[in-house]
Amino acid sequence: MSFTTLLVTFAISAALSGVVDGAAIQRRVACPDGKNSANNAACCALFPVLEDIQTNMFADSGCADAAHAALRVAFHDAIGFSSTDPSQGTGADGSIFIFAEQELGYDANLGIADAFNLEAPFIAKHNISVADFIQFAAAVSLTKCPGVLQPPFMFGRVDATAPAPNGTVPEPFQSAADILSQMQDAGLSASDTVALLASHSIAGADDIDPNAAGVPFDSTPSLFDTQFFVETLLNGTVSGNNKGQVPSPIQGELRLQSDFELAQDPATACLWQANVNNQASMARAFQQSFAKMQILGQDASSLVDCSDVIPAPPALSASQQQAFFPPGLSIKDVQQSCQTAAFPDLPTAPGAAVIIPSM
Ligand SMILES: *[C@@H]1O[C@H](CO)[C@@H](O)[C@H](O)[C@H]1NC(C)=O
Ligand SMILES: *[C@@H]1O[C@H](CO)[C@@H](O)[C@H](O)[C@H]1NC(C)=O
Ligand SMILES: *[C@@H]1O[C@H](CO)[C@@H](O)[C@H](O)[C@H]1NC(C)=O
């Protein structure tokens, strides 16, 4: 038998068995719309939603306000959950919108009205659960932000029949210990908490400083990069005195008290520092913890993996992956909190300190 025949035979038997080198070949199903295909026929229902929100909901299409709002509400909805106390909500269940009148009145959800106003008309138009819509929109929103790894999406959530109570969403003025124990109770470890906070790399505060909206947490709010973890470890010199806020290291940046405390807390300090200039590991950890968060309270075995419907996010260039000290700052400004590893060697960016605005 010639080499070519061997290859052909192998290719055919691999196709028949659906397995090559132990990895399953996904046989894609053609969707009834005649243009899309998916790994599971159930996922076809998501394409009209995807098309609509891409065109009309994320019309600005960048890693900016609409994307940030969609991501934020996904967490606020999901975290209404306790692994020990059923009265604390049923997780990623859509309750934040289904019971908006009640949940949007909680202090911690101040500002979630933006997400409600953004998403409600699209939820009304499409026949998927509110819970699924919220998490689907969040997964799609992430793909606007260069540096994110392919966001997962499981489909088939059951909607809430009751609101989550007041107090399930961590607040920026809570202590690190309180936040970690609340997250732990929901099923998210200290390392999941730090992993999920990579989202602050592409976020800003709307409701902390009454005189400024959308103040970013790092100097590159339109990139999912590791700058957030660098800049939260720099000595705060620019005052910020609102509730839940502490001084930040550069003008135009806002630091949450909770981010500062988690950066400094012995339980999380080394996890925090480990993300500095470690794009691949930060992005992978976020992807995994985000997957956990997205299905809190849901029966995972009854969900269908529709991650293949989520578009591929853009990558960071090599230079965008390089963490740096903002202009004028250096290792001397680092408030070292991890006792077991040296702070990575980083270059200082040239020029004057500036925030690169959201695209
Ligand atoms: C939620 O709880 C906070 C803190 O206990 C309290 O100040 C606030 O009034 C409560 N809000 C509602 C709407 O019950
Ligand atoms: C909505 O979707 C469900 C399945 O999730 C289906 O049973 C129902 O017929 C759909 N309704 C409409 C109006 O398409
Ligand atoms: C941090 O900044 C404050 C305020 O500018 C300053 O007093 C302090 O010396 C700085 N600490 C370090 C370690 O640089």
Image (cartoon, rainbow, N blue to C red):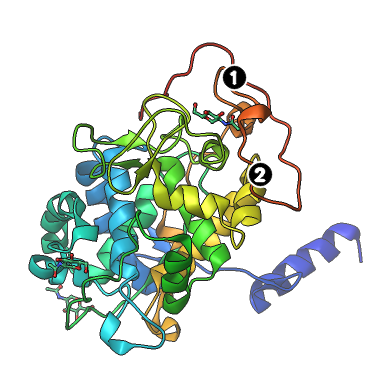
Question: What x and y, as percent, mark residue 94?
Answer: 23, 70
Question: What x and y, as percent, mark residue 333?
Answer: 61, 30
Question: Dot 2: within a 10 Å radius of its alpha carbon, few (fewer than 14), some, or many (20 or more) residues?
Answer: some
Query: Where is 244 relative to 184, above or below?
Result: above
Give the residue drawn at x 53%, y 36%.
231
Query: Where is 305 relative to 121, above or below?
Result: below
Quadrant of the snapshot with the C terminus: top left
Q: Nearer the viewer, mark 1 or mark 2?
A: 1
Quadrant of the snapshot with the N terminus: bottom right
Question: What x and y, as percent, mark residue 257?
Answer: 40, 48
Q: Quadrant of residue 356?
A: top left
Question: Which is nearer the eye, 165 or 277?
Answer: 165
The residue that mark 2 highlights is 278
Q: Is residue 328 left or right of residue 36?
A: right
Q: Secondary structure at mark 2?
A: loop
The residue under label 2 is which amino acid type? Answer: Asn
The residue under label 1 is which amino acid type? Answer: Ala
Question: Which is nearer the eye, 266 or 77?
Answer: 266
Give the residue drawn at x 35%, y 30%.
358
> Label 1 vs label 2: CA separation?
18 Å
Q: Is residue 1 left or right of residue 193?
A: right
Mark toward the start of the polypeptide (1 vs 2)? 2
Question: Which is nearer the eye, 203 or 60?
Answer: 203
Give the residue drawn at x 39%, y 31%.
253
Question: Which is nearer the eye, 10 or 271?
Answer: 271
Q: Is residue 194 left or right of residue 73?
A: right
Disc sitting over residue 349 in the figure: 1
